[in-house]
């Protein structure tokens, strides 16, 4: 599986494009803020001769869903997310004003994903892990065959997601990470929603939120 990352919006969210050998691809967190940024994404997809077949949201905070409407219009693909993200999705327009930004109302999800559910594109399979704490419906997408996990804003390199926000719960996030992520092989590469990649082993060893 090929993994590509493009950083979008003033909030600098990581949008991931995952492609299998056939060229079918999944996009995780389409964070394109405007038409110019969306053109960067579509030009990349076209340049790589990829065919988008799946759009996933790790959660529905505004920066992770900025581009959902444009993606739906261009590729006729709605996003899949956890059902507990309705609050964040419906309040995204209001929350954007706190950042001095604007956005259109995001479209309804194409469907909902539950803990342990698998989703696929081409020959690749991802397992969804429910990791609440930063957001009630936070999901991580795990590719066992490729030793990779896309954690959204749950786990970062050297940090964890904010919990002093509506729907946040610090103790729940700590427990989610320890019970769902830290049980994965330590060499698993973590691709977070912001910042650089890390590994499960590195975060277990050095993340300050888990030092004893």
Image: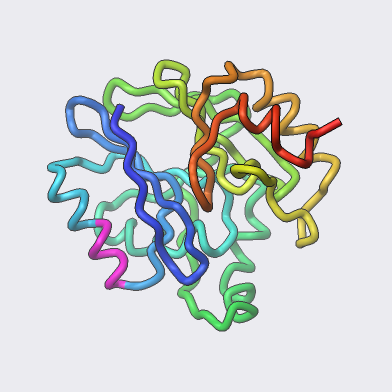
Q: Quadrant of the C terminus?
A: top right
Q: Quadrant of the N terminus?
A: top left
Residue bounds of the magenta highlight? 35-41
Q: In the orientation shown, which residue stands out farthest toward the front?
A: 206
Whether residue 172 is situated above or below residue 8 in the rendered picture: above
Q: Is residue 45 left or right of residue 204?
A: left
Q: Position of residue 21 (x, y in %)?
A: 20, 25
Q: What's the residue at 65%, 27% (across, down)? A: 181
Principal secondary structure, stretch drawn in magenta: helix
User: Would you say residue 45 sits in the magenta stretch?
Assistant: no
62 and 175: which one is in front? 175
Whether residue 32 is situated above or below residue 36 in the rendered picture: above
User: Would you say residue 37 sits in the magenta stretch?
Assistant: yes
Q: What's the residue at 41%, 16% (across, down)? A: 145
Q: Quadrant of residue 19?
A: top left
Q: Position of residue 26 (x, y in %)?
A: 34, 39
Q: What's the residue at 25%, 59% (across, down)? A: 74
157 and 96: which one is in front? 157
- Number of marks: 0
Q: Position of residue 76 (x, y in %)?
A: 28, 52
Q: What's the residue at 41%, 51% (across, down)? A: 15
Q: Is residue 158 left or right of residue 51?
A: right
């Amino acid at each position: 599986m090929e993994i590509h990352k493009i950083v979008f919006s003033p909030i600098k969210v990581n949008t991931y494009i995952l492609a299998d050998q056939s060229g079918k691809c999944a996009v995780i967190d389409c964070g394109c803020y405007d038409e110019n940024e969306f053109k960067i994404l579509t030009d990349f997809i076209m340049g790589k001769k990829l065919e988008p077949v799946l759009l996933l949201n790790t959660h529905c905070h505004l920066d992770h869903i900025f581009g959902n409407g444009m993606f739906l219009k261009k590729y006729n693909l709605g996003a899949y997310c956890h059902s507990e993200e309705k609050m964040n999705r419906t309040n995204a327009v209001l929350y954007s004003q706190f950042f001095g930004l604007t956005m259109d109302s995001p479209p309804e999800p194409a469907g909902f994903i539950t803990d342990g559910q698998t989703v696929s594109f081409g020959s690749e399979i991802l397992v969804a892990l429910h990791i609440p704490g930063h957001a009630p419906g936070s999901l991580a997408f795990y590719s066992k065959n490729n030793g990779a996990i896309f954690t959204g804003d749950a786990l970062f390199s050297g940090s964890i997601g904010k919990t002093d926000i509506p729907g946040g719960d610090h103790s729940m996030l700590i427990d989610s990470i320890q019970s769902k992520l830290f049980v994965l092989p330590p060499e698993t590469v973590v691709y977070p929603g912001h910042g650089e990649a890390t590994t499960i082993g590195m975060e277990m060893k050095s993340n300050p939120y888990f030092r004893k």
